[in-house]
Image (cartoon, grey):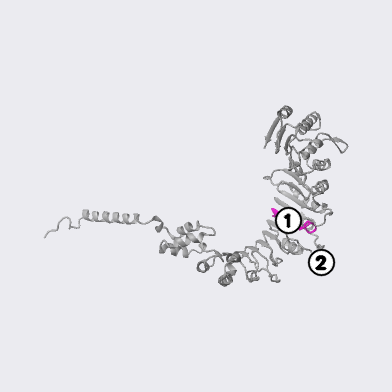
Amino acid sequence: MPTTEAESPTPNNLSVNHETKTELNLLHHSQQPPIHSLPPEVLHLVFLRFTGYYMYRRRLRFRLVCKYWAEVINSTPELWTLVSVGFHPELQAMIVRNSGNRLLEVDYDETWWEEDPGNKDRLAAFSRLIEPSASRWRTLAYHRMEDSESGTWPLSLPLHSLERIEIDGSTRNAQRPTLDAPKLSHVDVRLPSVNLRSLCSLQSLRLKATNSTLDELVTILRASPGLHTLSLTKTLLENGTEGLPSSYTTKIRLPRLCYLHISGPLAESSSFLLNSIEAPSLEMFNAKVTHPNDAADLTHICEAVSLYLGAFPLPKDQKPQVRIAANSWDMWLSIGNRTINIRHPMGPEADGAQGMPAYIASAMKHLDSRTCEEVTTLDIWCPEDITRECLCVIHSRFPRIQQLIVTDGLGAVGTRVRSVVQHLSLPSGLGAGEEWLLPKLTRLQLGVSGSNNRDIVNMIVELVGRRKEAEQTGEITELEIRIGIGKLDASAVETLSQSITKFDLVEA
């Protein structure tokens, strides 16, 4: 029987079968999500985008999507690098297993289970799980409970890959373990007794309320010439029975040090440390020193601080401004982002500005002439009258001040503004003849908290007139007055508007 056209394997029939099969394949392919066809290395990049402490919650959900996703996630060690004592034990084991030989970030925070009756068993199980991987810990955040029984366990392990460590909490154990961490570069320690003497090549060192000695700190600094950040908070830097080290005759050169913060050490230790360090690249500096002796002379610490306030030119991104503030308990002096705060408990009845001229002069002893030339703004805040001697010290160091900001504190009733305006209204007998203070001054910004300011208005008008007539001074052309309490009457505003080229009034 002859075959029909439909049964005959003609080219036309073959073509129809091929096209039908191709369409079916395309239809089947379109029903599959495109991500299922992505190669593993592309999926790796997708999953790596989910980072952060709670990233595992999402990744575990992704593993449930399909077998392919689960295999890709399990076989990507980069996805399993953070392990915490707060995680479920099964997740902890999965992280250690799937991380392969990757470096780990370890969070050993004993306070996670502080209220849990089984906290000791949880901590012990976690310790047993992660101890074999100690050589591949990259970071360690170790937070202790007050009644912790872990002793110095994690600090005694061979941490040969450790780069960063954060320790918080003291230990009852008198033993001070020596860290076996040759790659350690960032150290942040609060409270515990840890032997830091072995540390070297650090980039960042932050100590808070530790019992480190001055000799121990000097040893670390000498071994870390690449140090970028140094922060000492409430670290007494005790000297021991022998007193301050006398054998250090060479400077501790830290050419890369950009940030230096000292708060709490005794003035004697602080001045010795500051006199020993040489930091030509310093950008941010903050020193807060408390002296235990009410009648102590603080000029030595001020002279040490002067090496950092302006011994090197300010970075270009910092505002060239000097700020002076004082009260009965504290004195602040800052140049750009470099500040000293001396807490000197003289009693609330004492005159906080009494020693200011001498201290300011000492703190400016080593200022670089280029820094002094760059400063164009002076900001003054203190509750007492500013003495002429204090302004003379500033005048002698900063010849290019163009803007003066003076702000009264609460209850000052304009006394500080009055004293400054009065001193600027008359020439000072400096050098061979009369000389006006701040001769290049052209802008005034005054903050007054008093309610009756008519007398201040008269003093300002007199100041502007006298300096305009004087040959040695520039003319004050801009004035801004900010009033916290009360307001200026219309006649006072009119008087100032006629006396000053540009006058702005800001009332509360």
Is residue 298 found inside the magenta-colored segment of the image? Answer: no
Q: Give the Cα distance between marks 2 and 1.
A: 23 Å
Identify the secondary structure beneath mark 2. loop
Q: Which mark is residue 345?
A: none
Question: Quick check: can you spot residue 282?
Answer: no
- Mark 2 residue crowding within 10 angstroms, few (<14) / some (14–19) / many (20+): few
In this rendering, is residue 491 above or below 361? Answer: above
Is residue 258 found inside the magenta-colored segment of the image? Answer: yes
**The C terminus is located in which quarter?**
top right
Residue 324 spot, x, y in % from top left: 76, 45
* Near-viewer residue (299 or 257): 299
Q: Residue at x 29, y 56 (%)?
A: 24
In this rendering, is residue 397 above or below 196? Answer: above
Do labels 2 and 1 touch, CB within 8 Å? Answer: no
The answer to which image quadrant residue 146 occupies is bottom right
The tally of labels here is: 2
In the displayed structure, does residue 53 sit left or right of residue 340? left
Magenta residues, start to end:
253-270
Q: Amino acid at mark 1?
A: Ser
The answer to which image quadrant residue 137 occupies is bottom right
Q: Residue at x 81, y 43 (%)?
A: 390
- Mark 1 residue crowding within 10 angstroms, few (<14) / some (14–19) / many (20+): many
* Near-viewer residue (103 or 256): 103
Q: Which residue is mark 1?
A: 263
Residue 121 spot, x, y in % from top left: 57, 72
Q: Amino acid at mark 2?
A: Thr
In this rendering, is residue 32 above or below 158? Answer: above
Q: In this view, which residue lies farthest toward the left?
A: 1
Identify the secondary structure beneath mark 1. strand
In the displayed structure, does residue 368 sit left or right of residue 111? right
Residue 372 spot, x, y in % from top left: 76, 43
Q: Which residue is mark 2?
A: 241
